[in-house]
Image (spheres, coloured by chain):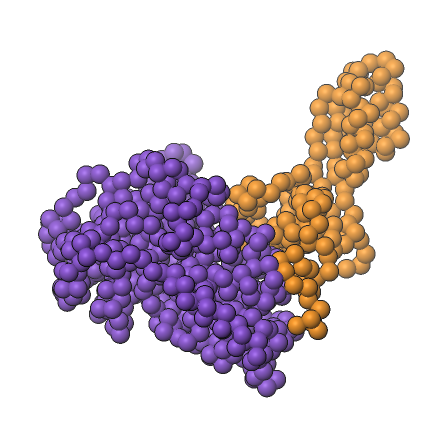
Amino acid sequence: MSRQMTGADMVVQALKDQGVEVIFGYPGGAVLPIYDAIFQQNDIRHILVRHEQAAIHMAEGYARSTGKPGCALVTSGPGATNAVTGLTDALMDSIPLVVFSGQVPTFMIGTDGFQEADTVGITRPCTKHNWLVKDTDKLAETIHQAFHVATSGRPGPVLIDLPKDVQFATGTYTGPKQANTSNYQPKVKGDIEAITKLVELIETAERPIFYTGGGVVNSGPAASQLMCELVDATGFPITSTLMGLGSYPASGKHWLGMLGMHGLYEANLAMHDCDLMINLGARFDDRITGRVSDFSPKSTKVHVDIDASSINKIVRVDLPIVGDVGHVLEDVLKVWKARGRKVNKEGLAKWWAKIDGWKKVKCLAYTGSETVIKPQYALERLEALTKGRDRYITTEVGQHQMWAAQFLGFEAPNRWMTSGGLGTMGYGFPASIGVQIAHPDALVINVAGEASWLMNMQEMGTATQFRTPVKQFILNNERLGMVRQWQDLLHGGRYSQSWSESLPDFVKLAEAFGWKGIMVSDPKDLDDAILEMINHDGPVLFDCLVEKHENCFPMIPSGKPHNEMLLAADAAAFTSGAALV
Amino acid sequence: MAALNIKKGATSHSAYDLRDFHSEVERSHTLAVVVDNEAGVLARVIGLFSGRGYNIDSLTVAEIDHKGHRSRITIVTRGTMAVIDQIKAQLGRIVPVHQVIDLTTEAQPVERELALFKVAGTGEKRVEALRLADIFRANVVDSTLESFVFEITGTPDKIDAFAELMRPLGLVDVARTGVAALPRGAA
């Protein structure tokens, strides 16, 4: 079934055929034909943002909370360059996005035309793949290929650059089924011989641990279910990276909490002392490993990853399995069950006894206060008062992000959206709007710091316009808390440029945009204020004034191994000397 | 676990690959990369090398299948075995890349390079240049009364050696194509 239509109509048609319901964007000269096509239909909802970076983060929030690819539309030149941070963020965290950018007409490319930028050149290193479409007849097929590339294998953002004359011209539309996607078919099944080896290791390990990451979430809910089944059936402890939180429930019996730089003591110590490490869809990031030469020195390491380039990139592993986590786990369970569901019970009992000893350290303990709200306390109350609800949490980047990861429990995947790899301040607020657009009736909370939050505060208008009742839970310490913490621990307490001067009155700011503003500073008022936030049917700006000098512990100083963690109690004795990466 | 004969610890060998990944010895590797000949594909490959801090010693590109729009990129790079494996994996995930072969490890490759040498001079030096060119089986592709342009093919080492000999005889300019390589044998 081939049809003639303009390039602009093809974009809309292809989006419909791909099942897209929402696109986040901002118009401009080079995308006017597409905006005209959007105007004349009602199937695809367009969310008008206030800045293109936010459009990408919203699409990320949408994608991460639904498992579907997120879509965005930006104009040429500044529209495209503004999208670069979001694209890089999505690339680092493996989020499937399809982004359309306008471009000057093909005959003007290279002439330094108005709002011209070399968009495919600029976005080449920050997309999984990108295309400049010069022929309207190839446009539809390119869009279908783009969706295929964004969502297959290790997901990631892709960009299609569309010159204005290609949008105006008429061509033949190709449907998704006719589009050729055969040249990109990543392997999803793991090598069965390697999987059998893994099962043998599972059967005999004395001190095993599952180390899981964003790959489990990306593989889909079935992968999380299979993983929970394997974890609970083997009785092995499980820890997760920041990206993987929720794939195993925080209330689960075998959960050790997050690992890494600000991970839990028991999780990091178990990683250090284990004899079998099973990495499922994580990538040995430097925030996880600490000093690589001392990383888990006594373990046999197994790495399951869909991206072959993740294997042996940082840590040399003993048993690599290239494949999709879900597919591999299905085979692991099948083989393990067929061989009689064996584990080393005696070894495991001793291992858990050791882990329970580490848990007694109570690494998240902090000194409470009756006069000032401690940020940890604020999150404990937020957790208590929202527990049991189907709750979606986004975050900005910094101390509040780490506290949120430590103090909030996630029971299901796709409920936790945070900028892990790139660490993009300003991510959380637009991401929360994207999540709320996908889940209009859910409780969506962005746990933020005041400095991060200000980076994309212009999106207040978007939230008001589209009636997204997002809750902005700002832990306001009037500081760039994590920068301040490093300056405190490593730069002799010289707080260079790390305080938030001239902050707005957040309550008035909220009211100016038609939001509800709540300010709270007394711990006694906190519960009522949180309930007021949750119960308000509309966006809320929650200004929670917290302790200004609180540091986030535990902490593995950069360049130190896992067993040299700093706990809150050790911090005073800590002398600088760790690498500053 | 000992029964599996997998040595423990981050410095152990892989259970499957017996090559010495931990060798810190850097050596030259010739990689063949088969790609779709589409706009920007070379920029993707080169961008990967510069973006991740790998070196390119030599680069040769041309379309080898006009109907299928396939190009072959031959890259000579240096690194430890671990770095070369990482380069291969990184190249392999570029969408228009079809195949990456480490010719140095997987085959004993035939490697050839073509070069043009312009040598200017008169008298005994000119005669000597011509005599050496003959020994190296270089062809004269342009000549004036004061100069020759020699065309030579061979391994990069042979071309280096020829350049050394031409330098004192009036070498003016050199153009080299970079290495083209194929595995030996029927496959």
Q: Position of residue A330 (x, y in %)?
A: 52, 77
Left or right of B26? Residue B152 is: right
Residue A436 can be seen, yes or no: no
Dividing the picture into quarters, in which one does residue B143 lie? top right
Instruction: Give the x, y percent position of residue A477.
Output: 24, 48
* Residue displayed at 12% across by 51% down: A507
Query: In terms of depth relative to the viewer, which is nearer, A526 or A223?
Result: A526
Looking at the picture, tell me which residue is in the foreground, B25 or B85.
B25
Q: Nearer the viewer, residue A288 or A247?
A: A288
Residue A278: % across, % down:
55, 68
| Placement of A116 over or under A88, stated as above or below | above
Name the residue located 61 percent from the left edge and 62 percent from the top edge: A298
User: Is A260 situated left or right of A346 in this image?
Assistant: left
Residue ID at (57%, 54%): A294
Q: Position of residue A545 (x, y in %)?
A: 19, 51
- Is A474 displayed left or right of A121 in the figure? left
Q: Is residue A395 left or right of residue A328?
A: left
| Between B18 and A252, the one nearer to me in the picture | A252
Chain A, hue in figure: purple
Q: How many numbered marks have been drawn onto this rendered protein structure? A: 0
Q: What color was chain B assigned in the picture? A: orange
Query: Residue A141 is drawn in which quadrant?
Result: bottom left
Query: Compared with residue A497, is residue A357 higher up or lower down, i.e. above or below?
Result: below
- Taking the view exactly as shown, the residue that stands out farthest to the top is B123
Q: Is residue A271 visible?
A: yes
What residue is drawn where x is 50% and y is 65%? A270
Q: Quadrant of the N terminus of chain A?
A: bottom left
